[in-house]
Structure formats: structure tokens, C-alpha cells
Image (cartoon, helix red, strand yellow):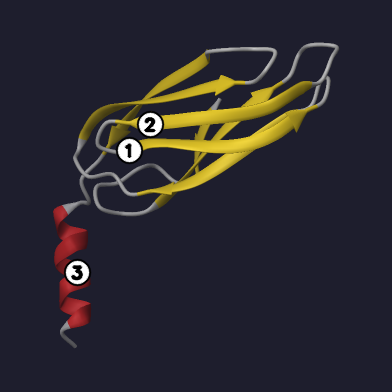
Amino acid sequence: MFQFSKHPVLNEATIMSVTFRNHLKVPITDGTFVVEGSGLLNPKTIRIGDVGPDEQVTMSEEITPMRPDYLNMFATFSSKELRGVVGSTTVKVNQREKWLTKFIKTLKHK
């Protein structure tokens, strides 16, 4: 499952979180996430270690969208017991409203 701390806006940082829940009745060992998204995040591997039965783990990463569009995010979870558990989402990255950009520039010049 993907979540964002705020709606992604072009060239503004936001926190993206990815959650995995172990629905098995046995522990999962040596878990890793590989997360990537075109225009959002270069492929990144995050080691999360062991996940107990019915336990959930969340990894978070700051991202700064580089282009406005509908962009795809992918996360792959792998461990010794499971391989290639894939989740994905499509994110709409908006441009900042032009009136807000002009307003911020006027504040910086005062």
C-alpha cells in the first residue's frame, strides 16, 4: 500500500510510504523493498529485516516529483520465503498554481 504525506506537486518534497503485511503464520526473514517511480524516484533498495506473522512494516522515503503527469510507482518486496511481491500505484503530480507561485515570489522580494 502506498501513501503520501501530501498530494505530490511538481518540485516539492513529499514523504512516500509503502506498507507490507505478512499474512503468513510464519516469520518472513531478510525482507527488502525495491521502490521506484519514473519521474519520482530512482530504483532504491531498502532492507527491512524480519517480519513476524501478521506483522506489518512500513518504509518511508522523501521524494520530489520532477515532472507533472500521471506517474507510476512500483514497490517489490522480497525475502527468503517470498519473492517478487509487487505493488503499484499511479500518482497524479500537479503543477503549483500560477497565482501561488507569483505570490511566493512577491513575498521573497519584500
Q: Quadrant of residue 108?
A: bottom left
Q: Secondary structure at mark 1?
A: strand
Q: Secondary structure at mark 2?
A: strand
In three-dimensional space, the C-alpha distance between marks 1 and 3, rounded to whole angstroms, equals 32 Å
Of badges 2 and 3, the one in the foreground is 2
Q: Position of residue 95 (x, y in %)?
A: 20, 45
Kindly identify the residue that appears in the image at 37 percent across and 54 percent down.
Answer: 13
Question: Tag 1: Cα neighbours inside 10 Å, few (<14), some, or many (≥20)?
Answer: few
Work out whether mark 1 precedes mark 3 in sequence or the reverse, and give the earlier one.
1
Q: Is residue 5 visible?
A: no
Pick out the residue farthest to the bottom. 110
Q: Position of residue 75 (x, y in %)?
A: 47, 25
In three-dimensional space, the C-alpha distance between marks 2 and 3, rounded to whole angstroms, equals 33 Å
Q: Secondary structure at mark 3?
A: helix
**Image marks 2 and 1: residues in contact by CB distance under 8 Å:** yes
Q: Where is mark 2, residue-wise?
A: 36
